[in-house]
Image (cartoon, rainbow, N blue to C red):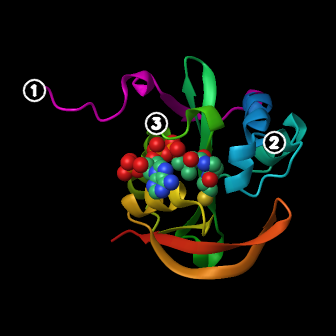
């Protein structure tokens, strides 16, 4: 029997590339989706101008990628670099369009971000925060070598209630 494909065939054509200012409108639409917002710090009613400003304010060492399927953006993510004595650290953030979650897209995007961090930036430590009830995200990060280091209590306000978040990190080497 043929081995199982690593990803379902419909994401074989996934393209991962650097974000462009012209992507702001599509990214804003994804950031407004309820599932994406639930897992991130995104506020309702994000506009393409908000996203454009954020993209314009990125530092030179930051990594910002999108994943697209048939020309449609289905995920975004990247790394923010720290200055000075934390220059070895990258802060990771990512999210997948609500209609495309659970198909391996997050895994593909995360692999690409980590390969840039490991093979091209030489980062020692990648860190992130994830809500303690975000089981798919925690599973994804653990599978890619992240460990829970601690828990922030009342980390963010979400849909009328405070929610805790784990600090997770992956150390390279
Ligand atoms: C979290 C997120 C990035 C994952 O991306 P994705 O494309 O849906 O994830 P993938 O399909 O690549 O893989 C998800 C993994 O979680 C697992 N999973 C799915 N639902 C799960 C659940 N309820 N409990 C435990 N594991 C679960 C899947 O089985 C898969 O693991 P496997 O490959 O070992 O089977 C995506 O769901 C998302 O963007 N959510 C909203 C925004 C968000 O939460 N961003 C992260 C902020 S820290």
Q: Residue at left 74%, top 29%?
A: 26
The residue that disc 2 covers is: 51
Q: Can residue 162 be seen in this view?
A: yes
Quarter of the image with the N terminus in it: top left
Q: Which mark is on residue 84?
A: none
Structural distance between the alpha carbons of marks 1 and 3 = 23 Å
Of marks 1 and 3, which one's residue comes earlier in the chain? Answer: 1
Q: How many marks?
A: 3
- Label 3 crowd bin: few (<14), some (14–19), many (20+), radius 10 Å: some
Observer-nearest of 78 and 43? 43
Q: From the top left corner, tell me how far across and down residue 89 is, in percent.
A: 55, 69
Q: Does 12 lie within the magenta span?
A: yes
Q: In this view, does 130 lie to the left or right of 14?
A: right
The residue that disc 3 covers is: 103
Q: CB at mark 3 closer than 8 A to ligand 1?
A: yes
Q: In this view, does 38 lie to the left or right of 120?
A: right
């Amino acid at each position: 029997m043929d081995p199982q494909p690593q990803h379902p065939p419909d994401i074989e054509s996934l393209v991962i590339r650097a974000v462009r200012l012209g992507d702001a409108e599509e990214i804003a639409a994804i950031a407004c989706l309820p599932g994406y917002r639930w897992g991130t710090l995104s506020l309702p009613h994000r506009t393409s101008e908000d996203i454009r400003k954020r993209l314009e304010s990125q530092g030179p060492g930051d990594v910002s990628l999108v994943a697209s399927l048939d020309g449609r953006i289905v995920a975004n993510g990247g790394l923010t670099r720290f200055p000075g004595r934390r220059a070895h650290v990258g802060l990771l953030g990512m999210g997948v369009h609500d209609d495309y979650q659970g198909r391996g897209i997050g895994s593909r995007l995360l692999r690409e971000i980590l390969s840039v961090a490991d093979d091209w930036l030489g980062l020692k430590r990648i860190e992130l925060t994830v809500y303690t009830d975000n089981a798919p995200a925690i599973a994804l990060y653990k599978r890619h070598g992240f460990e829970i280091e601690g828990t922030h209590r009342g980390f963010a306000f979400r849909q009328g209630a405070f929610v805790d978040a784990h600090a997770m990190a992956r150390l390279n080497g």
